[in-house]
Image: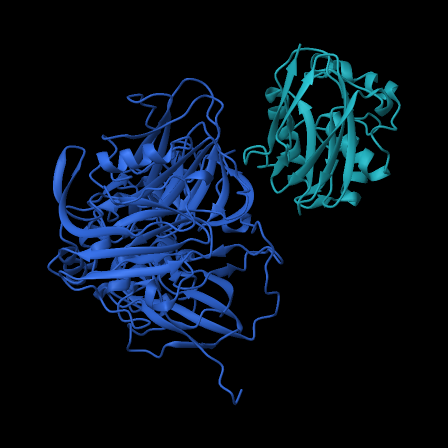
Chain colours: A blue, B cyan
Amino acid sequence: MHIAPRGLSRRDALKLAGAAGLAGIVTAYPGRRAFAASAPPLDLAVERTRITIDGETSDAIAIGGSIPAPTLRWREGDEVVVRVTNRLDEPTSIHWHGLLIQGVMDGAPGFNGFQPIMPGQTYTYRFKLRQAGTYWYHSHSAAQEQEGMYGAIVIEPADRDPVRADRDYVVLLSDHTPEAPEAVLRKLKVSEGYYNDNKRTLMDFFRDAGRDGLGATLRDRLDWGEMRMDATDLADVTGYRFLVNGKGPGDNWTALFKPGERVRLRIVNGSAMTIFDVRIPGLPMTVVAADGQNVVPVKVDEFRFGVGETYDVIVMPTGDKPFTFFAEPIDRTGFARATIATRQGMEGVIPERRPRAVLTMADMGMAHGGMDHGSMPGMNHGSMAGMDHGKMPGMNHGSMTGGSAAGREQAVGWADAGTPPGARALSYADLKSFSKTRDLRAPAHEIEVRLTGMMSRYIWTLNGEKFDEGAPIRVAYGDRVRIRFVNTTMMAHPMHLHGMFVELENGQTDRMPKKHVVLVPPGQTASVQLTADEPGEWPFHCHLLYHMASGMMTRFIVEPKTASL
Amino acid sequence: MRLHTRTLSTVAALITGASLLAAPAAAFAAPGEAGHQHGTAAIGEPAKATAKTRTVQITMGDNYYEPNSVQVKAGETVRFVVTNKGEFLHEFNIGTAAMHAAHQKEMAVMMEHGMLTPTGINKEMANMDHSRMPGMEGTSMTHDDPNSVLIEPGKARELTWKFTKNAALEFACNIPGHYESGMVGKVDVQR
């Protein structure tokens, strides 16, 4: 039990912690009175365990005895001490995702002098909390994150919280596979399409030809062929179970409310590989924070959720009835589900599943615009134009045109979440920082980061180079810089920088939203600014676990200014 | 997308600088209000500041009120002096939860149309003749909105209200997202 609705006393919290076998692990409740000047030391053991999801048990790794790991409820300004003991037979680490922190305490092995925690060892993290909001923590070693090493962090603000809620829940999404992560990566390397069982069929081909014309369809297919990618490759790995707070759709994790209450959901995407579309049919969500940072509240019906991101939303359910929290991975291979209800045991309707998007050339950024397929031997598109598709068996063009978004069977392009007409999906452009941008200097220089990959060999890179094969990024302490992400691949990459927030260039001028993860859509560019005010050598990587593991990472070095400057 | 007259008129009142208190009471009973779903009769009525039995100071922040509850007696006339110390535009609106819910929809439309921004009022937009806008025909800017004041950052405004009945009332800010964030207070009307 790691959720602590408001109103829970410290004694209750301790009782709960004790009941969960977490004695000594303080799940401090966020009420003001409950906080001492500083939180007492916290002991977290990392150990192998088993997890049961919807009745099926498989191997996993737990931090602090549970999956997800206990929610750490702290207060801004507190100095916290966390002793992490490694009871695995392999090295481990814990990274505090989104926290502004001294480099060595950031917990990424190989950076800032942090060494992995070896088997049997205890490492003592010690840091002062310089921020408030919803964050999370996870392993930064091997693929342990995939195996269950993730938990939420909730930091109460030192000042008044601009958001008031009657209930406060962490909703941590994750993906779980019974396969060992090493086996997953091995299979991806052998055959990139291994997990893609939605390969397009001949009938898909006819349907596209009917819609787009045969020439366009052939050209499209040729491009995909050249990329050696599949147009249905929205995600690399399938076979996942999608979890809410460690529970499967059947387990049905439930958050309770009384009608008319304000319920704050602190939603964390702690998946290894899964980008979700999140909605609660019948219940609009007012987004009040993104990546832990307060934003001007914006009411939406759904949002796309990159790996590593967090959104805090307020919902105001009325009536004595259940609502279904529904998160579909963008490749639509399943769903995570939870229930927001007035009592345990209630179940809402499982909403109709959304169509899976087929990627288009636009998702490749038209990077191949210069290619001339017409010159390819054997290709003469012109001669195909005369074909009478109407006579093809099984083709009924009339039924293929348009159609309403609701209940349609196809979504086109990465950005198409299948949002029904009238519903509002959050876009990055909607995010507006609650506090004013502090550093309004124009960026001193621009850093281009190309997101690159050779999917056929499952090598993912930044600027065409694997981690530590290319040059690191260097910026001078205090500089304001722009980072421009150019995604040359046909997958979205949630790009995560440790140590500092980046500020999204999303059209805002003096209220640019702060993020620690920026989801860069396929074939698109995105730009951010940051003030390099945290000296150190920070990991900068794609937060898709297997992309990072295969090389999509670099060092972002903030160098002290020398006297000669 | 039908905008209620009173929302627009609140903006109008602000723009012309007309104090709500100074507005003639007769305007509140203007014809056209009759068709409104949310007449204010059930929640009380506006009053002149001079009729007050006491004054309550309320501070607005982002996004909250301080204090966030007020106790009144049925029949009491209270002069609210509301100061916006935040960075965003806020509203002080007395009504039932249902009235606020309806008003939030109007506010959202005004925000989308650019008449309101998170930090203020777009005077150019708000001065336009909205009565000719599609979906807004028949509305005019001559009414006033007796139970609400919009207050820009750094400004203070007043609203004097006579609480006539024992009703479940809230004072609320219906700028999009603010009510949901908890910018609402309870008016405890006692006999």
Horizontal side of B150 relative to B61 (left or right) equals right
Q: Residue at x 50, y 63 (%)?
A: A528
Rendering coords of residue B66 (x, y %): 64, 35
Q: Is residue A514 above or below residue B48?
A: below
Q: Is residue A548 above or below residue B103?
A: below
Q: Nearer the viewer, residue A147 or A546?
A: A147
Rendering coords of residue A397 (x, y %): 38, 38
State whether residue A416 appears in this view.
no
Q: Is residue B9 above or below residue B96?
A: below
Residue farthest to the bottom, as pictured: A564
Question: Is the N terminus of chain A in the top left, top right, bottom left or bottom right quadrant?
Answer: top left
Q: Nearer the viewer, residue A287 or A262?
A: A262
Residue farthest to the left, as pictured: A89
Horizontal side of A504 relative to A140 (left or right) equals right
Rendering coords of residue B106 (x, y %): 66, 30
Rendering coords of residue B50 (x, y %): 87, 23
State whether residue B162 appears in this view.
yes
Q: Could you tell me how many numbered marks the image carries? A: 0
Q: Nearer the viewer, residue A211 or A466?
A: A466
Horizontal side of A514 relative to B58 (left or right) equals left
